[in-house]
Amino acid sequence: ALLSLLKPQDYSSIQNHCPIRDSHSISWYQGSFIDNQREGSGSIHFHSGFLFLGTFRDNKRIGEGSFYYKNQVIFEGRFRDDSAITGKILINNTIDYEGGFMNGMFSGNSTLRIGDIIYQGEYKNNCKQGYGYLYSTTNEELLFEGDFDKNIPVNLGTVHLNSSLKVLIRFTNEIPSRVIFLQKENQIGEGFF
């Protein structure tokens, strides 16, 4: 079951929940203008029902801003040049993603919750990229740690079965190829796939 969590994830449901890429058409803007450009505090109302409250400069979102849907905050973050650079995506009043964005995609050191699993680590272009950790939210235990390349575990990873037993897994071509069982840091078994 744990290995299924290590497979590539589709984050579109979380990202589609919040129009940080501004793919929704604007119904109307309320706020100040300077030289026919949005400037200062204002709000954008989208045809889709989303509302953005924040600050504008030269007609672009900048600084702190929030998206709302049906009177609930679904995104809080910082904007630069009309794009989100850091923030939190909230679904059902819980943080489902907190971290950086680049071109509307997850980027940088971030935390993502999917169901009862939390991933903490690096993202690049919406993919787990670099070292990361998977935790259980039910018992707050570390489940897995290791390197990822485009969402796929690579090299050596560690599956934590309990506080004294863990399994080191060597990944070759996305598949576990070798395992070493450790109990309290002493090797107690080894196997190959």
Image (cartoon, grey):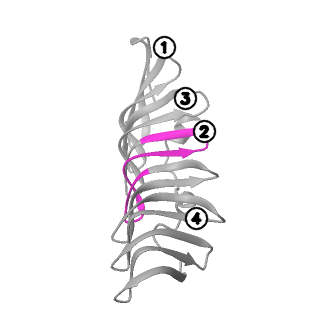
Q: Mark 3 points at which residue?
A: 140
Amino acid type at circle 3 is Glu
**In front: label 1 or label 2:** 2
In the rendered structure, are the residues bearing label 1 and label 2 in contact, judged by CB atoms less than 8 Å apart?
no
Amino acid type at circle 4 is Tyr
**In front: label 3 or label 4:** 4
Res 154 → quadrant: top left
Disc 1 from disc 3: Cα separation: 16 Å
Disc 3 from disc 2: Cα separation: 10 Å
Q: Position of 112 compared to 123: left or right?
A: right
Q: Earlier in the sequence, mark 1 or mark 4?
A: 4
Disc 1 from disc 2: Cα separation: 22 Å
In the rendered structure, are the residues bearing label 3 and label 4 in contact, judged by CB atoms less than 8 Å apart?
no
Residue 187: image tag: none
Q: Earlier in the sequence, mark 1 or mark 3?
A: 3
10 Å crowding of disc 2: few (<14), some (14-19), many (20+): few
Amino acid type at circle 1 is Ser
Quarter in which the N terminus is drawn: top right
Residue 116: image tag: 2
Q: Which of marks 3 and 4 is nearer the N terminus?
A: 4
**In front: label 2 or label 4:** 4
